[in-house]
């Protein structure tokens, strides 16, 4: 880098442009990173947490048999490959359901809610709800393009609002099919209604009184 620094200073003093100086610095920096900084390809983490070492071993054996089967037409190798494939499928299902069982019905621990986080994480990853607007139907045709969906929704929203027109009360009622509003009784009318109800109630109670029933019985006898 010291030599690069001196070279850049010499070029700058000779009138080189900033673009040339930047390209020289960038090239030397990339070369230094490649030559002097160690790097390696990181192994991708498996996305299947239920894969046990035993299952991984069976998968590697199945893959080796598959490569041998592709190179050779020996029926024995083909038979071994099929057996290994069936065994891998069986062990994968068993490991998966054991993993689910440990999440849904965990063993008793000192903290009863220690595995709730794992349970809800599993539920969250199992969701298959898609975000966005579902296909919309217009004139018998389904539309999934965002522009078409926006146009359909705009038409729907516009149809929900009336235009800026004035209507008389009668026209408004006829358009909305509104029933006629009943007149609210006045205070005097309400008092008269209550008086009639009270008088009828008192008469009914007097008919049910014991004295009234005795007088009726005496009159009949």
Image (cartoon, rainbow, N blue to C red):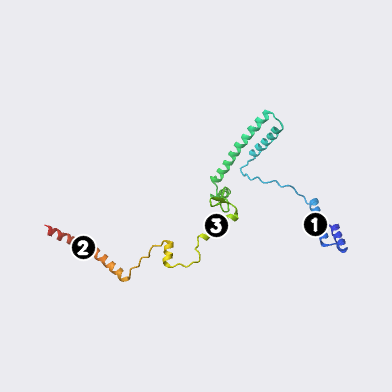
Q: Label 2 to label 1, Cα distance in Å?
A: 112 Å
Q: Residue placed at 66% from the left, 35% from the top?
A: 62
Residue 197 as seen in the image, left or right of residue 31: left
Residue 57 in the image, given as x and y percentages of width and height: 66, 37
User: Which of the 4 image quadrants contains residue 72?
Assistant: top right
Circle 3 Cα neighbour tier, 10 Å, few/some/many (<14 / 14–19 / ≥20): few
Camera-side mark, 3 or 1: 3
Which is more toward the observer, 112 or 167? 167
Gap between marks 3 and 2, in whole Å?
Answer: 69 Å
Q: Earlier in the sequence, mark 2 or mark 1?
A: 1
Which mark, residue 153? 3
> Where residue 90 sits in the image (x, y, percent)?
59, 36
Q: Residues within 10 Å of mark 1 (few under 14, many from 20)?
A: few
Q: Earlier in the sequence, mark 3 or mark 2?
A: 3
Residue beneath label 2, please? Answer: 206
> Outermost residue, left direction?
221
Disc 1, SS = helix
Residue 207 in percent (x, y) is at 20, 61
SS of the residue under disc 2:
helix
Toward the top, the furthest residue is: 75
Q: What residue is disc 1 on?
A: 26
Locate the C terminus by quadrant.
Answer: bottom left
């Amino acid at each position: 880098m010291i030599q690069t620094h001196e070279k850049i200073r010499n070029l700058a003093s000779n009138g080189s442009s900033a673009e040339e100086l930047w390209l020289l610095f960038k090239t030397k920096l990339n070369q230094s990173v490649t030559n002097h900084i160690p790097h390696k390809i990181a192994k991708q983490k498996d996305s299947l947490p239920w894969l046990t070492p035993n299952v991984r071993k069976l998968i590697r054996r199945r893959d080796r048999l598959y490569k041998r089967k592709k190179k050779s037409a020996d029926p024995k190798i083909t038979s071994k490959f099929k057996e290994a494939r069936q065994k891998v499928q069986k062990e994968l299902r068993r490991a998966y359901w054991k993993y689910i069982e440990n999440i849904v019905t965990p063993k008793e621990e000192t903290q009863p809610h220690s595995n709730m986080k794992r349970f809800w994480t599993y539920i969250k990853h199992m969701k298959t709800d898609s975000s966005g607007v579902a296909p919309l139907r217009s004139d018998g045709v389904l539309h999934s393009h965002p522009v078409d969906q926006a146009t359909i929704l705009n038409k729907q929203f516009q149809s929900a609002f009336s235009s800026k027109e004035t209507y008389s009360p009668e026209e408004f009622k006829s358009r909305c099919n509104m029933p006629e509003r009943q007149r609210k009784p006045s205070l005097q009318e309400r008092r008269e209604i209550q008086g009639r109800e009270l008088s009828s109630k008192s008469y009914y109670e007097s008919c049910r009184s014991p004295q009234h029933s005795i007088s009726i019985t005496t009159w009949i006898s």
